[in-house]
Image (cartoon, rainbow, N blue to C red):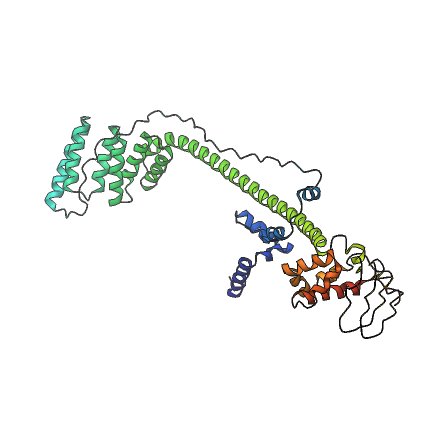
C-alpha cells in the first residue's frame, strides 16, 4: 500500500480519535457502519450528538416536569422487547459405535532412551527378542509378545519399527491408549512410518475417534498402500463423514447466530443513538424556550417599566432646574408623571409634552441584547441580577446603583438598549 495513503489514513484515524464529531458527516456513514459491524464502541458525537451538553444546560435552566411531558410526543411507541437469540444446543449424532471400547488406564509401558548409542551387540539382542515376539504372536500369546518387544525396544530404542510392532500388539489386546503412545514415539523417530499411522488409526477407531482415525489411515495408505488399511478405512470413513457434516452444520448455525446477534446489536446501537438524538433535540428546544423566558423580564417591565412614579425624589443636586416631567412618558412605559422636583440652579424645563409614543411594553429585540457577550457575562453576576430585580420592583431604585462601578454600568447599558429599542418617538 502506498506510504502516503497509509500516512493519510493514520492522520484520519487520529483525527477521529481526537474529534469523533467528524464521523457525523453523512458522507462517512459507510465508515460508521463498518465500525459498528466490528462491534466498535462508537461515541455519541459521531452521530451528531453533544456529549454532556444536555446535563450542563439542564443545571442552568431545568424545565418543569409538566413542560417536559408536554414537549414529548403524545403517543409514544412501545419499545419492542428484543428477543434474545437462543443458544445453539448441539444434538447428539447417531453413529454405529460397534467395536468401540473403553480406554485402557494401565501404567505407561517402558520406553527406551532414543539418545542411546546402540552397538552391534545390542542390535543383535533386539533382533533376537523381536524373533521371540513373533513366535509368541503366532501362538496368540499377546502378553509374551509385548514382553519380548519391550526387551527389544530397551536394547534398541532408536527403531521406529519395534515401537510400531508393539503398538500393533496393543491394538489386538484392545489397549488403544498404550498403542497410541507407542505410535507417537515411533513417529518421532520416523515421521513417515506407515506402520505407526496404521496402528494409531486403528487405536483411535477403538476409542470412537472416527475423524482422527480416518486421517491416520489415509496417511498410512498414501505412504504405503495396503489393502488391509484400505478395507478398514472404508468402515471408518462413513462415520467420520457423518461427524464432519454434523460439526459443519452446527458451526454454520453458530456463525449464523453470531451474525444475527451482531446485526441486532448494531440496530440497538442505532436505535439508542437515534433516541439520544431525539432526546437531545427536545432538550435543546426546551432550553431555548427556557432561555427566551429567562432572557426577557417576565411580562416585560410592567407597563413598559411602569414609569418612574413620583419622579426622582428630592431632585438632583447641583441644580438642574425643575423639569416638568415627561407627562406622556414613553408610550406603554407609563411616562414620568410627576416630573423631577424643583431644583435650584437652572430654570425649570417646561417638560416634554409629546412624550415618546408607540413604545413597546417589555423588552424589545431581546436577541440583540442576548448576543452582547459583555452583557451576558455581566448578567451571570449575582449582584447584577439582584440589582435588576430591585429596579424591576421599584424603578426609582436605579439611583442607588448609579455610582456602583460593577452594577451601574450594566444597568445603564441595559437601559440604553431598552431605550434604543423603543418605538418611534412621538415628539418631545
- What residue is drawn where x is 27% and y is 40%? 184
79 above or below 40? above
Between 96 and 137, which is closer to the camera in this rendering?
96
Between 244 and 425, which is closer to the camera in this rendering?
425
Single out the residue that lies furthest toward the left: 121
Between 397 and 157, which is closer to the camera in this rendering?
397
- What residue is drawn where x is 64% and y is 46%? 279
| Residue 296 seen | no
Residue 362 is left or right of residue 11, and the answer is right
Question: To which quarter of the image does residue 82 belong?
Answer: top right
Between 183 and 355, which is closer to the camera in this rendering?
355
Single out the residue that lies furthest toward the bottom: 346
Residue 83 is left or right of residue 198, and the answer is right
Residue 312 is left or right of residue 132, and the answer is right
Residue 30 is left or right of residue 332, and the answer is left
Q: Where is residue 149 in the image (x, y as percent from the top left)?
A: 17, 35
| Residue 206 seen | yes
Q: Position of residue 110 (x, y in %)?
A: 18, 37
Q: Quadrant of the C terminus?
A: bottom right
Amino acid at each position: 500500500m502506498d506510504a502516503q495513503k497509509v500516512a493519510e489514513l493514520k492522520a484520519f484515524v487520529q483525527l477521529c480519535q481526537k474529534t469523533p464529531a467528524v464521523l457525523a458527516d453523512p458522507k462517512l456513514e459507510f465508515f460508521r457502519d463498518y465500525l459498528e459491524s466490528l462491534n466498535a464502541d462508537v461515541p455519541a458525537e459521531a452521530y451528531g450528538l453533544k456529549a454532556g451538553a444536555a446535563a450542563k444546560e439542564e443545571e442552568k435552566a431545568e424545565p418543569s416536569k409538566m413542560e417536559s411531558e408536554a414537549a414529548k410526543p403524545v403517543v409514544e411507541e412501545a419499545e419492542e422487547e428484543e428477543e434474545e437469540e437462543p443458544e445453539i444446543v448441539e444434538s447428539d449424532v447417531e453413529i454405529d459405535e460397534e467395536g468401540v471400547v473403553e480406554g485402557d488406564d494401565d501404567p505407561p509401558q517402558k520406553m527406551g532412551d532414543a539418545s542411546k548409542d546402540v552397538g552391534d551387540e545390542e542390535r543383535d539382542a533386539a533382533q533376537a527378542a523381536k524373533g521371540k515376539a513373533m513366535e509368541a504372536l503366532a501362538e496368540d500369546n499377546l502378553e509374551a509378545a509385548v514382553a519380548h518387544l519391550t526387551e527389544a525396544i530397551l536394547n534398541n530404542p532408536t527403531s521406529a519399527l519395534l515401537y510400531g510392532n508393539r503398538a500393533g500388539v496393543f491394538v489386538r489386546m484392545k489397549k488403544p491408549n498404550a498403542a497410541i503412545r507407542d505410535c507417537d514415539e515411533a513417529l518421532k523417530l520416523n515421521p513417515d512410518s506407515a506402520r505407526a499411522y496404521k496402528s494409531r488409526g486403528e487405536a483411535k477407531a477403538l476409542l470412537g475417534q472416527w475423524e482422527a482415525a480416518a486421517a491416520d489411515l489415509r496417511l498410512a495408505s498414501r505412504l504405503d498402500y495396503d489393502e488391509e488399511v484400505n478395507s478398514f478405512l472404508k468402515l471408518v470413513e462413513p462415520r467420520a463423514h457423518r461427524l464432519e457434516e454434523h460439526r459443519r452444520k452446527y458451526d454454520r448455525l453458530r456463525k449464523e447466530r453470531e451474525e444475527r446477534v451482531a446485526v441486532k446489536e448494531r440496530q440497538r446501537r442505532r436505535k439508542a443513538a437515534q433516541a439520544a438524538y431525539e432526546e437531545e433535540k427536545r432538550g435543546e428546544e426546551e432550553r431555548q424556550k427556557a432561555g427566551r423566558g429567562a432572557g426577557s423580564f417576565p411580562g416585560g417591565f410592567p407597563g413598559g417599566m411602569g414609569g418612574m412614579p413620583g419622579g426622582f425624589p428630592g431632585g438632583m443636586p447641583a441644580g438642574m432646574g425643575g423639569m416638568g416631567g415627561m407627562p406622556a412618558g414613553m408610550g406603554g412605559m407609563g411616562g414620568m408623571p410627576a416630573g423631577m422636583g424643583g431644583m435650584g440652579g437652572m430654570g425649570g424645563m417646561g417638560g416634554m409634552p409629546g412624550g415618546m409614543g408607540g413604545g413597546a411594553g417589555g423588552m424589545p429585540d431581546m436577541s440583540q441584547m442576548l448576543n452582547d457577550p459583555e452583557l451576558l457575562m455581566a448578567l451571570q453576576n449575582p449582584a447584577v441580577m439582584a440589582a435588576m430585580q430591585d429596579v424591576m420592583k421599584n424603578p426609582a431604585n436605579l439611583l442607588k446603583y448609579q455610582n456602583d462601578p460593577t452594577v451601574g454600568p450594566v444597568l445603564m447599558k441595559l437601559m440604553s438598549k431598552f431605550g434604543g429599542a423603543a418605538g418611534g418617538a412621538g415628539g418631545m
